[in-house]
Amino acid sequence: MNKSLQTDRTTVRRLPKRGSYERELVYSILDEALICHVGFVVDGKPVVIPTIHWREGDRLYLHGSAVSQMLRTLRGGVEACVTVTLLDGLVLARSAFHHSMNYRSAVIFGYAAEVTGEAKIRALHGLVEHVCRGRSASARPPNELELKQTLVLSLPIDEASAKVRTGPAVDEEEDYALPIWAGVLPLRVLPQEPIADDRLPDGITVPDYVRRYRR
Amino acid sequence: MNKSLQTDRTTVRRLPKRGSYERELVYSILDEALICHVGFVVDGKPVVIPTIHWREGDRLYLHGSAVSQMLRTLRGGVEACVTVTLLDGLVLARSAFHHSMNYRSAVIFGYAAEVTGEAKIRALHGLVEHVCRGRSASARPPNELELKQTLVLSLPIDEASAKVRTGPAVDEEEDYALPIWAGVLPLRVLPQEPIADDRLPDGITVPDYVRRYRR
């Protein structure tokens, strides 16, 4: 599918040079991020809920409880705006005005459809791998009841944009001479020491995919 | 203001024991997070945009360019749903089904009003301090033109909720005997080595508030 992701409403208007409609960039943001924020309209009012997302090919997946109000609303034909943001650093300029952040974000508009049967099982496998690559081979797979209690939706990624800021502060020319430290403070989401469950049987060690976890 | 933050639509329905309407908890989440996701409705459709937020007392602040479509829409009397999420860790259960994440999130509904005059200057000072405590004393303050180019909005925090998951995986009783590692992989947003600007005058060293940066 090579259709453009750009539409009138996905066109980045503020600082358009930061905008992109490249699938590769949008997908890299979706794949790195662990959570998204899903917006939808209820009684004419906005609701924004954080949840896990994942991607397979040109579709974005969401899941949750079969009684989730958000998922049931979306399944009912209500449009979603799914936004994913990775914060890469603080940009400290000489002037307060030019302070900024380095980030990568993606915004996707679309209608979600329910995923069922074998495709649902494959999708849930993909979810575990998205969150923790290598984990799905060891976790107990979902049984019939658990599958029934889980709702999986997917939406096509065909109306989207990315927005990215990178690099140093950009100050007013006359401010560069000021005796004020300026620069970028990079931020990273980093795993800390794993906390083993209290009820592990003896001899079960931390798997490599946990010990070496990286996004 | 001791009015309850709980209303029908801020009532946490999925896993209600994770929900809270305590100001102290909502505020601690807002104060730790560097970005929020702002949802609003345009032509009946949801839009979710990431941006910086900050809090002063019982009000939440947003800012941006004076020509920002989002801010102009909100200023025009369109309701916002502002959601903030802190991801604290991956919860790896024995079963795929019981995998989860530890998180703290806050959702605020409200109408934003423009902040002007002295209050605007104070608010922008608060913004810099929210992002980087100690920075506002050294950065050049905004001049008249910069103030004119900046729009500051605030909304009352009087309809909100928090949702929090902490602690270990919760598996089905019969799964605890399985030879599968389970536990929590904590995640933290951590500052990396500061990158000094290429154009710093000689002798300007990294300030303590950057070197020791912590949320």
Image (spheres, coloured by chain):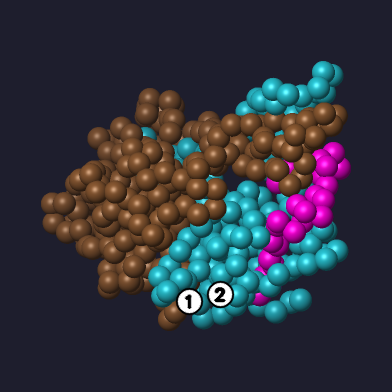
Chain colours: A cyan, B brown
Q: Which residue is mark 1?
A: B45
Quarter of the rendering containing residue B11: bottom left
Please report the bounds of the magenta region as a residue range: A131-159
Quarter of the rendering containing residue B129: top left
In this view of the protein, can residue A28 be seen by the observer? no
Q: Which residue is mark 2?
A: A79
Label 1: which secondary element: strand
Q: Disc 2 to disc 1, how far (Cα)?
A: 7 Å
Residue extending farthest to the left is B118
- Left or right position of A100 against B158: right
Up-down relation of residue A37 to residue B162 (above or below): below
Residue in view at x 51 percent, y 57 percent: A49
Circle 2 residues within 10 Å: few <14, some 14–19, many ≥20: many
Residue in view at x 50 percent, y 54 percent: B13
- Left or right position of B198 against B92: left
Instruction: Indicate the position of residue B197 as horizontal and vertical percent values.
Output: 45, 40
- Left or right position of A3 against A99: right
Instruction: Indicate the position of residue A116 as horizontal and vertical percent values.
Output: 78, 67
**Chain of the residue that carries numbered disc 2 in the rendered image:** A
Label 2: which secondary element: loop
Out of A203 and B131, give the one closest to the viewer: A203
Residue B214 part of the magenta segment? no
In this view of the protein, can residue B115 be seen by the observer? yes
Quadrant where the N terminus of chain A is found in the figure: bottom right
Disc 2 residue type (three-letter): Glu
Quadrant where the C terminus of chain A is found in the figure: top right
Residue in view at x 35 percent, y 52 percent: B6
Tags 2 and 1 touching, CB below 8 Å: yes
